[in-house]
Image: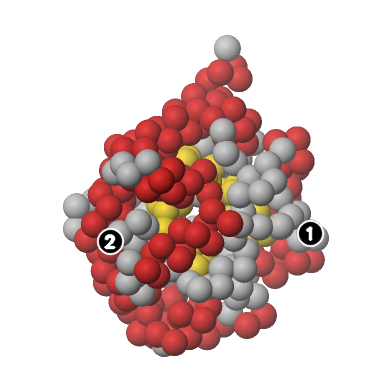
Amino acid sequence: MTTQRIDARFAALKAEDRAGFVAYVMAGDPSREEALEILRGLPAAGADIIELGFPFSDPMAEGPPIQRAALRGLKAGLTLRGTLELAKAFRDGDADTPVILMGYLNPLESYGYEAFARDAAASGVDGVIVVDCPPEEADPLTDALDAHQVSLIRLATPTSDDARLRIIAERTSGFVYYVSVAGVTGVKEAQAGSVAPAVERVRKASGLPVAVGFGIKTPERAAEVARVSDAVVAGSVLVDEVAAALAANEPAAPRVLAKVRSLADAVKGARATETV
């Protein structure tokens, strides 16, 4: 298995002594064309890694903002296959930025693990986060992904004890996604004080970088988390900008990319501010 793009990005971040910024957007939200415009604009706006959600009708770990984004993506006709096509269109113009798909197991089962892994690799996808796939049931999917050099990136949570973290770390590659709050996305706010020791535990168990997501809505909170983690993930706050643009009858990309820029700037300057 290779995690070349992911590893290279985290190595560069470590050399710069800063955390990375991970931007989550939903495929097809609010349309395929605008979603591609957003994707293509993310690196210049400051995204170090992109998480691309694939729409699903029952996103159980998501709060209302991403639930609504998924419904908009489905309405726009974005299937899992369409999401891979979107990723490929992005990859054709960007050879370096890691792209991680994030979603649920049912669409992968319907697609077929081997076919999905093959097509994900061909589309330039670097990794996959499957929210509802427990490690105990992941071997068939992981085998397929390994065969095509696509990483399976697992979630750790505040309730993951040391024994569970050892299980989570098995066959995980690239990085571990730490869910900073109990519950769904976009509802509670992450607290750096509780995140810091959890990140250390996850790093120790996995030997991998730790990206922290769920509950990061403001530049101030993003900067706090950036001081204690390897990367900061924002999603609900970005898809909220799509909803706001639709309500105002405005293009979505400028609003989303402006929000990305403000959060990414806070993440990039967080440790410099700390040492001043």
Q: Name the front one of labels 1 and 2.
A: 2
Q: Residue furthest top?
A: 276
Dot 1 amino acid type: Thr
160 above or below 213? below
- Can you identify the residue that label 2 sits on? 32
Residue shown at 61%/49% (left/top)? 186
- The span from disc 1 to disc 2 (Cα, nearest Å) is 37 Å
Dot 2 amino acid type: Arg
Check contact, mark 1 vs mark 2: CB within 8 A. no
Residue shown at 79%/66% (left/top)? 163
* Closest to the observer, 32 or 13: 32
Q: Earlier in the sequence, mark 1 or mark 2?
A: 2
74 lies left or right of 152? left
Categorize mark 2 by other alpha carbons within 10 Å: few (<14), some (14-19), many (20+): some
Q: Residue 271, image x and y in percent?
A: 56, 25
The image quarter in which residue 179 lies:
bottom right
111 above or below 81? below
Residue shown at 37%/33% (left/top)? 258
Residue shown at 48%/46% (left/top)? 240
Q: Residue 248, image x and y in percent?
A: 37, 41
Q: Residue 135, image x and y in percent?
A: 64, 75
Q: Residue 183, image x and y in percent?
A: 71, 57
Quarter of the image for the C terminus: give it: top right
Label of residue 136 in the image: none
Label of residue 159 in the image: 1
The image quarter in which residue 190 lies:
top right
SS for dot 2 = helix
273 lies left or right of 122? right
Categorize mark 1 by other alpha carbons within 10 Å: few (<14), some (14-19), many (20+): few
62 above or below 106? above
SS for dot 1 = loop
184 lies left or right of 232? right
